[in-house]
Image (cartoon, rainbow, N blue to C red):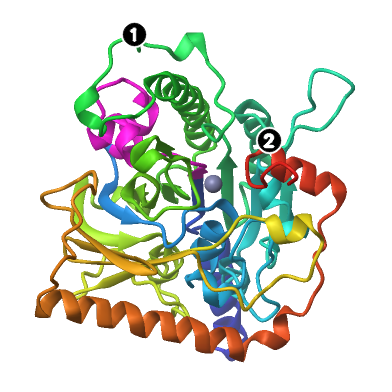
Amino acid sequence: MSSKRFLIIAFSILVFCTFSYSTNIIIIAVDTLRADHLGCYGYPRNTSPNIDEFARNATQFNNCYTPVPRTGPAFASMLSSLPPYKHGAKSNGLPIFDNIQLLPHFLKKYGYYSGAFVAIWTLKKKICGLDKGFDDYTEVFNRKMWFGVMSPEGKAPKVNEAAFEWLEQNSRKRFFLWVHYNEPHKPYNYHKKFDRGYNVVFPSFYPKGCSFRKIKKYDTEVGYVDFYIGELIKKIKHLNLYEDSLIIFLADHGEGFGEHNYYGHGQLLYNSTLHIPLIVKLPGNKNLHSVIERKVSLMDVAPTILSQLDYPVPEQMEGENLFESSNKERVFYFETYKGSAQQEKNKMFQIKETPLKYGLLKNNIKLIFKNKYKAYDLAEDKFELNNIYENPDEEMKALSGLLEDYIKKIQEYIEFTEKYLKKKSQLSKEDLEKLRSLGYIKKRE
Ligand SMILES: [Zn+2]
């Protein structure tokens, strides 16, 4: 074969490989969605027919945890595969450190075009820095009814409208798309159309003291967002992108309805806010339906995407490939920080401030530390009500030793990275007002 002919054939193969087949990646993220409020996770209310249908053709992870129960920090962990103390976006209102690279940066090396659609003020690029590496990063917000004031949230139909247009324009590219829906984040709106007989309550699903009035509204929000996720999946199918895409459905954190006298998310490290749904549809519809009980993390998403595409996982990523069961007994760590109060006073962020609380999960034992230890056996005590830390045995002491090491690591890291953190807050008055309306900043003292 002449060398000219060989070159033509080689070039044709390269062009064929580049343009004829590519695995697109789509993350569908729902803010504040508890796994246990979805039908496929055993919820008795019919909140999620479309998500359940998606799960029937995918792999469902029944025990996925977020490392931090707050929006900006959790999505930063999803995109960086790092815990909050390392990526820097510790609270809503703080951006990632300058030296952090996110998933789209790595995908770009392999020809991926990346787009994000985010629908909450805390994910504005100026606030969290999560636009890094994305080719398109679209902030979707609705206007309020009166005076044309911008709402701190974008509604699901508006998110779909923007994402559909992007999909139509980019469906022939090799792409990574992240679509973020803000329902059912507070304030919960009541959607009559999605109240499917919600006057019947299921008290065995909650410890005493939970608000069924709030839960009912929240559940209609889940039904509402589920409907628009169904529309998104239809659109992906209509564009013939469904079968060959790697599609991941997840949430950033859950929501408290009065468990431990707490409503909302961010402050506590109980499972009502740490346990999240995670459902993965592999390209080519491999593993059509399976359920995995092994504990996994939101930080596993980025390494899984890279591994499934046969790309190397950068060394700094701390998560694991969801489809490669690790032999070691895995330990999951949790941390949570104050809200955005520091910025309200427009002071330099007090980076030396340590997390409000630290947590750890190994096997079925959850350990939480704030001044003192509390421990819960999740196998026996799903509501985490019976502290079993009194008179700790050797095993329990070993666990608290692990958490102590983690706390030390955080302290060392804070000292090491201090140079990155001498920036003044960049939040404007408007940002502060939106963060306040979303419940992240307390009313002025
Ligand atoms: Zn959130």
Secondary structure at numbered mark 1: loop
| Point 71% across, 79% down: residue | 421
Viewer can see residue 94:
yes
* Left/right of residue 279 with respect to residue 157 in the rendered view: left
Q: Which residue is more in the foreground, 367 or 93?
A: 367
Q: In the displayed structure, would residue 43 be above or below residue 262?
A: above
The quadrant in which residue 185 appears is: top right
Depth check: give the residue in front, 326 or 64: 64
- Name the residue at 61% across, 55% down: 339
Residues shaded magenta: 29-55
Q: Is residue 328 in sight in this rendering?
A: no
Q: Which of 334 and 155 is in front in this view?
A: 334
Residue at image x 54%, y 86%?
413
- In the image, 107 versus 89, the foreground residue is 89
Q: What element carries label 2?
A: loop
Residue 141 x, y percent position in the rendering:
74, 35
Mark 1, residue position? 197
Q: Residue 105 carries which label?
A: none
Where in the figure is residue 300, as x and y percent of width and height? 38, 65
Return the x and y of residue 288 as percentages of the image width and height. Answer: 24, 45
Q: Name the residue under label 2.
A: 153
Q: Which residue is drawn at 63% across and 42% down?
A: 167
x%, y% of residue 272?
Answer: 35, 44
Above or below 2: residue 118: above
Q: Is residue 150 left or right of residue 41?
A: right
For the residue carrying disc 1, how many other residues have a C-alpha within 10 Å: few (<14), some (14-19), or many (20+)?
A: few
First reached walking from the N terminus: tag 1 or tag 2: 2
* Distance from Cα at disc 1 to Cα at disc 2: 27 Å
- The residue type indicated by label 2 comes to Glu
Asked if 295 appears above or below 182 in the picture, the reply is: below
